[in-house]
Image (tube, rainbow, N blue to C red):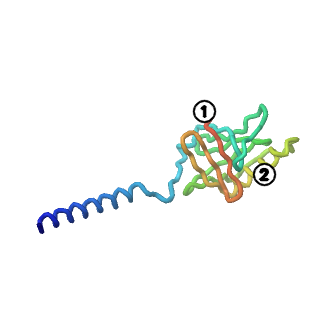
């Protein structure tokens, strides 16, 4: 009887150890995106703060080139050298054309994306969906294709 109890305790301890080890492998509180997951990809804006974007014939894009060079457009076009750190994208030396659009939504988006990229935005890439988020804004893009 004692042998059966000891055997059961050993099995329970082994099972508990295995669950603890496997649980440590699966759980990661901060999953960071890598530059190679974005480079040479082009994304098209689908929604802003949960609302679908209606841009007419113009695609609102965000592209990542070699060495994390970021290029995109809302009303204005913008570009700069991006850097990823702990899941945050920042674009140093962000340059943007300075025209005023007749579409007030695009003017608002210009300001939001400029602030987001200059100050840093959390990046999430899930399947074909890219999300850039700050405390005040969330932009959701869909993968369009690879850049050539």
Kindly indicate whether the residue at mark 1 contacts the one at mark 2 (C-beta within 8 angstroms): no
Measuring from the top left, give residue 5's x and y in whole percent.
16, 66
Residue at image position (52%, 48%) is 34
Measuring from the top left, give residue 37's x and y in whole percent.
53, 43
Residue identifier under label 1: 145
Q: Which mark is residue 117?
A: none
Residue at image position (72%, 42%) is 52
Q: Quadrant of the N terminus?
A: bottom left
Measuring from the top left, give residue 115's x and y in whole percent.
73, 55
- Residue 46 is drawn in which quadrant? top right
Residue at image position (62%, 41%) is 64
Q: Residue 41, relative to residue 114: is it above or below?
A: above
Q: Quadrant of the C terminus?
A: top right
Q: Residue 78, relative to residue 88: is it above or below?
A: above
Q: Pointer 1: residues within 10 angstroms few (<14), some, or many (20+)?
A: few
Which residue is more in the foreground, 68 or 47?
A: 47
Which residue is more in the foreground, 30 or 6?
A: 6
- Residue 126 is drawn in which quadrant? top right
Measuring from the top left, give residue 51's x and y in whole percent.
72, 45
The outermost residue toward the bottom is 2
Secondary element type, mark 1: strand
Q: Which mark is residue 111?
A: 2
Mark before the other along the chain sequence, 2 or 1: 2
Which residue is more in the foreground, 85 or 106?
A: 106
Q: CA distance from mark 2 to mark 1?
A: 26 Å
- Residue 38 is drawn in which quadrant? top right
Secondary element type, mark 2: helix
């Amino acid at each position: 009887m004692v042998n059966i109890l000891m055997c059961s305790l050993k099995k329970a301890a082994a099972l508990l150890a295995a669950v603890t080890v496997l649980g440590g492998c699966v759980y990661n509180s901060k999953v960071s995106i890598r530059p190679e997951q974005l480079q040479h990809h082009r994304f098209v804006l689908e929604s802003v703060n949960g609302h679908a974007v209606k841009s007419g014939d113009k695609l609102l894009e965000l592209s990542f080139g070699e060495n994390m060079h970021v290029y995109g457009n809302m009303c204005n076009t913008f570009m700069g050298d991006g850097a990823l750190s702990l899941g945050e994208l920042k674009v140093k030396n962000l340059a943007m054309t300075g025209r005023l659009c007749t579409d007030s939504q695009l003017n608002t988006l210009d300001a939001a994306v400029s602030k987001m990229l200059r100050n840093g935005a959390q990046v999430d890439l899930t399947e074909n969906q890219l999300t850039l988020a700050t405390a005040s804004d969330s932009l959701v893009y869909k993968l369009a294709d690879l850049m050539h």
